[in-house]
Structures are given as structure tokens and as C-alpha cells.
Image (spheres, rainbow, N blue to C red):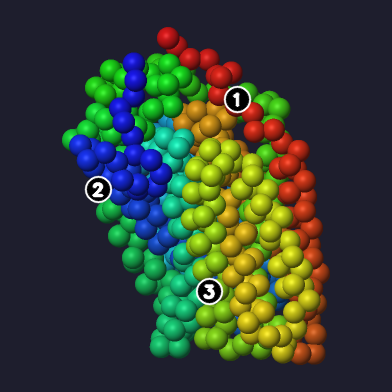
Amino acid sequence: MATAPASEGWMATAPASEGWWRYRYLLVLVLCICYSLQFFDRVAMGVVAAPMMKDLGLTYAQYGNGTFLMLVFYGPMQTVVGLICDKFGARRVLLFSVVAWSLCTLWMAHVQSVNEWYLRQIIFGILCATEFVPSARIVARWFPKRQRAQGQSFLSYSWILPPAYAPVVVTMLITILGSWRPIFTIAGLAGVVPFVLIFTWIHDRPEQKKGLRPEEICESYEDDIAEGTYTVEEVQQGKISKAKIAAQRISVGEIMRYPQWGKLCVAYIVLQALYWAAASWIPLYLKETFNFNLSTMGWWASAYFAGGVIGTFIGGRFSDKLFKGKRRPIIAISYLGVIPFLLLFATFAKGVSPLALLLSLSACGFFANLSWGAWFSLPAEMFSPEVHAKALGIMNGFGYFFGAAGAPLVMSRLVVKTSTGASYTWSWVFIAALAVIGFVLIMATRESKMRAQVKTTA
């Protein structure tokens, strides 16, 4: 049986009888708002690094240690969270995440010592690892393949937009409030907003939303219907059995044994290394290399993530439309394109042309963030949306443990203190070398369709 007509592209115009609007657009917008509020904590940490280090008496190595501790616990928890989502549902996990994040953020406002900060970072990493995987899992189930990279790209704004505006907001608040601590009190109390939004608007599956048109539900399941996994009737009537859903799921061991999975996980480590190297060190790099004051540094740091906003949008759209659902080309372009700008960061010194610095920051942010949508669509298409949370949890576990946690830690050991500030030359050369490795790996990976190997019921 044919599927119902569907809209083409991201929020594109559909036939007049259906209209262009889809509930999934509102859903991903709400998820993006909620996740971006939660992500503010991590962005603010990088911006307040200088006054916080002075207040707590942190060395560069200790600051790197604290970032490492948060991420090294955050990473492995992603795998656990994928399993929890299968058992309790993504929406429930998200509600827990908001409460945990709010409490940990309020705690940050009162940290008094290096060891207490270390402890807070560990607990934050464990409890707050619960926000990303369920968010991406919901998007993967609600969006069909032809729009999935665009949907995941929109969700990616959750961690790309905050670094674009937060440095300006945070530095302004520090100036007004006279301290970095009240920023975390304000952010923690604001946690009530994402909790209410998730409770009101978010549903794990399209058929759970009361009043949603059957045709719109079918759009979300159009790939499953085309492959014979579900029928139009059971999708439209919201009668997909738990047995059929369970039949789509496979074990962690089966996921790990797929031929391309190992290379993809290693290549994904590079993406997380790129993001966290920038988020953790660009503010300090700008301040200490160019002697920017706190306010000026905030504006310049925003340029990198402003480029990322554009790159994420274009990457998702091109992956869905220009490359017809092929994810590898966008990922390869991302890794190759970022290399020359990382090497420019390694050579820049005080007195560099402001235009050259601005263009390099923006272009590096553009390429480094180009492939989010493609990456987060892969697990749903290699296996199925029902396996997405588990597979993405594994991939993100590797990415955070080795890339997000490891790269900033290594960079902290490669920063060289000088008479005029600090030299980040070898830090950026190290990240550029990782991008080369990522490019080679992704070019050596076949974008094979593994979903057909998953057993389904008739």
C-alpha cells in the first residue's frame, strides 16, 4: 500500500490539502530550546575559566583535569543511557535530566575548592549524560530519512547556538554582577522552563500524540512502511505492537560486530575532539594569545560558533537533498575543510589582521560543525530508528571518552606559557592531525545498509 503524500525538504511547502506544517517541526524546536538551556552550563564554564581559575587557584593542568573528569564519565554513560531509553522511554529520561542538571548547576555557584570542583564535574558527567541520546532518539523516530539529517542538524543548534551568544551574555553578566558565581544560580533556576516544555510537548512516538493526523504519522514511518516493517493500517491507527518494536532492536554485541562500525566510531571521536577543543580552549586562546579583555574575548569567541550555525544548517540540508541521504560526503568535507584553519590558529600571534582572525574563526566553525546532522542520522539508517538510542549511545560513548575528554586534556599539556601569555601552537597542530585521521577513516568506510540484517516479524 502506498504511503501518504509527504512534504519535501525542511519545512517545505506540501500540497494545499495537507498544508506545510508538521508537528515534528515544533517537537524538534522544543527539544532544541530545552537542550540549549541545559548546555549553557558547559559553555559558561569555558567563558568564566579565567576568573574561576583565579578564584579556585587552578593551574592549566587542573582546569584540563576538571574538563576531562566531566567528559570521561559523561562519555561511557551515553551507552548506559541508550539502554535506559529502551526500557523507560526517552521522554522520562529527559525529564530526569533537567532536574539533575538544575541541581548540578546550582551547586557550581557554591564550589569552593579544586577537589569539590572535581567531584562536581564527575557527578555532573554521570547524571547529565541523560539529555542528548533521548533527544536525538526522539528526532530519529519522528523524522523520515529524507528529512532526518535536517532534523538532527536543527537539534545540533542546542550546542552550537549557546557558544555563539553565551560568551557575550556571560561576560556582560560578570561585569554587571561582579562575579562569575551568580551566573550558575540564574541558569540552575531556569531549569523549570525545559522541564515544563518537555512535559507538555514531547512524546516518544508520533502515534502517542493525541489529535495527530494519520497521514502525518505515516510520514514519520514512511521508510518502515516501504520496507514492510509496519503496515499503513497499524501505523495510522497507532496499533504498532510492542512485539514488533522489540523485534527491531538488537544487542550491543550485534551492533559492535557490524563491519563498518569500528571505523565509524573512531572517525566520530574526531568530531567530538574538534567541538570540545574549541569550546574548552578558544576563549582562553583568544585572551592569552591576543591579550583581549574578557568582554572583547566574548565577542571574538562567538565568531567560531556563528560559523557553526551556518555550517550545521547547510550540512544537514545538503546531506538530505544534494547527496540524497548519503552521509559520508558531508563528513569527509567537514574534516578536510577544517584542517587549514586549525593550522592557521597554530601560527597566529598578537598583531594578526583582525579580518584574518575573524574569517579563520568563522570558517573553522563552519567546517567543524558541518556534519552533525549526517552523523546523528547514521545509526537510524544503518540499523533502524528503534535501535538509534542504543547505537548512538555506543558511538557517543567512544566520542566523549576519547575525543571530548581526551583532546582538551592533551591540549592542556601542549599549551606553553610565555613571557607575553601562552603559546597554543602545538595544541592546534594536534587537533589538525586528528582531523586528518578522521578524513582518512571516513574515506575508507563504506556506507553500508545494515538494517536489512535486523530480524523483523511479519
Q: Is residue 353 left or right of residue 175?
A: right
Q: Which residue is mark 3?
A: 302
Q: Which residue is mark 2?
A: 200
The residue under the point 64% across, 44% down is 329
Which of discs 2 and 3 lies nearer the camera? The answer is 3
Q: CA distance from mark 2 to mark 3?
A: 32 Å
What's the residue type where badge 2 is placed? Answer: Thr
Residue 271 percent across, percent down from the top left: 64, 53
Q: CA distance from mark 1 to mark 2?
A: 36 Å
**Callout count:** 3
Residue 30 percent across, percent down from the top left: 33, 53
What's the residue type where badge 1 is placed? Answer: Met
Q: Badge 1: how crowded within 10 Å, few (<14), some, or many (20+)?
A: some
Q: CA distance from mark 3 to mark 1?
A: 39 Å
Let me know if residue 12 appears in the view. Answer: yes
Sequence-wise, the earlier of marks 3 and 1 is: 3
What's the residue type where badge 3 is placed? Answer: Ser
The answer to which quarter of the image holds residue 53 is: bottom right
Q: Which residue is mark 1?
A: 450
Vertical placement of 32 versus 209: above or below? below
The residue under the point 78% across, 76% down is 347
Q: Badge 2: how crowded within 10 Å, few (<14), some, or many (20+)?
A: few
